Image (cartoon, rainbow, N blue to C red):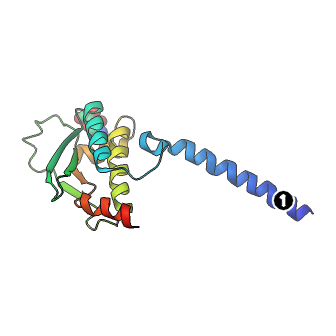
Amino acid sequence: MWGFCLVLILACATGEYSEVQVVQEMDNFLENPHYLKNHEIGELFTQLAKDYPDLAQTYTIGKSLEDRPIYALALSAPTGESKNGDLLRPMVKLVANIRGDETVGRQMVLYMAEYLATHYDGDTEVQDLLNRTEIHFLPTCNPDGFAKAQVSH
Ligand SMILES: *[C@@H]1O[C@H](CO)[C@@H](O)[C@H](O)[C@H]1NC(C)=O
């Protein structure tokens, strides 16, 4: 009987704990976690570029065979020197969802892009990273495959 109660209490405690975690992690699109459709990626990147004009720029690298735009986001903080003159700043590109049904990496890249943009103010580790690096995020280079995977799986 006591064992049973203890298990119940533990279960409740764990439930509360994970609920607190979820609340802390709630950040923009994580409030309603779901796989973003291609046009939603474009909307998210446009919003980030609008909200953080000093940090974020969005662009497309062209269109897929089925005419879906392939969205990218670049993140980098301006330093004292002109950004164009900062030729020694390392550039990194994160690419995901090369195969259409490999979708977790797509969300990881999206979440990381959003996390870094939204945490630059007030997080010195994020500042340090974006002060010294230019990071390009390409969450999907196969939007057609992703759309097909949604239908068939
Ligand atoms: C990043 O750069 C900004 C602007 O130059 C500066 O104010 C800030 O202290 C830097 N942050 C870190 C952690 O180096």
Above or below: residue 43 compared with residue 149:
above
Task: Name the residue at the right extreme.
Answer: 1
Q: Is residue 92 visible?
A: yes
- Residue 81: quarter of image: top left
| Badge 1 amino acid | Leu
Residue 20 on image: x %, y %:
61, 45
**Left or right of residue 16, residue 149 in this image:** left
Q: Disc 1 designates what residue? A: 6
- Residue 116 occupies quadrant: top left
Query: If the image is split into quadrants, where does the C terminus sit?
Result: bottom left
Please provide percent x and percent y for residue 143. Answer: 25, 57
- Taking the image as shown, residue 46 lies to the left or right of residue 126, namely left
Measuring from the top left, give residue 74's x and y in whole percent.
21, 46
In the displayed structure, would residue 24 be above or below residue 139?
Answer: above
Q: Which of 133 and 34 is in front in this view?
A: 34
Q: How many labels does the image show?
A: 1
The one nearer the camera, 56 or 150, is: 150
Visible residue check, residue 103: no
User: In the image, ligand 1 is in what quadrant?
Assistant: top left
Q: State the image quarter where residue 138 is shown.
A: bottom left
What residue is rendered at 22% in x and 59% in y? 141
